[in-house]
Image (cartoon, helix red, strand yellow):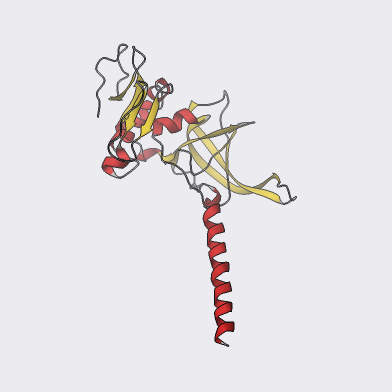
Amino acid sequence: MPFYVNGILSALALLLLLWRAEELAEACSCAPVHPQQAFCNADVVIRAKVVGEREVDSGNDIYGNPIKRIQYDVKQIKMFKGPNQDIEAVFTAPVSAVCGVTLDAAGKKEYLISGKAEAGGRMHVTLCDYIMLWDSLSATQKKSLSQRYQMGCDCKIVRCPSLPCEISAPEECLWTDLMIEKQVHGRQANHYACVKRADGSCSWYRGVAPPKKEFLDAEDP
């Protein structure tokens, strides 16, 4: 009898292990990115209010099962990057395990939303995209959305995972928030942009005013 019970317990433990492994494999995982990187990687970046929410079918999978997505109806306030038409709907996966995003659809909160463009005034977003409450952004971040981030899209922001770390090319800026401050939304993320200088190199720039043409007064963190 003890052998039989041990066999059942071993089988249950194996099933639990396999279930947990599958759950972890399906979990959404995103590498941290500087806001400028998120801006440059996105097809669309808008400021908007979410005014509606519903679940919709988006075709079928290979087995013929319907693919569900959440559709957020939005009222666009400003477009910082994207197509020549307003975004009217934002789509995302239905659950966070597959990178679905949850937004407040009461129409009272303003968001900065970045993501991939779809046809017909639509976009798709995931947890890996840069989506923030507008009021949580710093003054520098808000100003950078209009010009400065775009100026640095030819630059490369390199994350510092551990010390020592350094850049390997002049067009790189070293991002140290996670290493020094132990957070993604640190000083460089909130107050700096990596901007290309006149000589082709890139450097961190801080300030609300646009950089001077020669960018000789660049201020490194």
Q: Is residue 144 visible?
A: yes
Left or right, 31 with reference to 92 = left
Name the quadrant of the C terminus.
Answer: top left
Q: Quadrant of residue 144?
A: top left
Residue situated in front as seen by the camera: 48 or 214: 214
Q: Position of residue 123 (x, y in %)?
A: 57, 35
Q: Position of residue 126 (x, y in %)?
A: 52, 42
Q: Is residue 78 visible?
A: no
Left or right, 157 with reference to 54 = left
Q: Position of residue 130 (x, y in %)?
A: 45, 38
Residue beneath the point at 30% across and 41% down: 179
**In the rendered view, would you say 94 is above or below 206?**
below
Residue situated in front as seen by the camera: 55 or 9: 9
Residue beneath the point at 73% across and 47% down: 62
Please identify the residue farthest to the front as the structure is shown: 3
Residue situated in front as seen by the camera: 59 or 195: 195
Number of numbered discs? 0
Q: Position of residue 2 (x, y in %)?
A: 55, 86
Name the quadrant of the N terminus.
Answer: bottom right
**In the rendered view, would you say 156 is above or below 98?**
above
Q: Quadrant of residue 58?
A: top right
**In the rendered view, would you say 206 is above or below 199?**
below
Please identify the residue farthest to the bottom as the structure is shown: 1
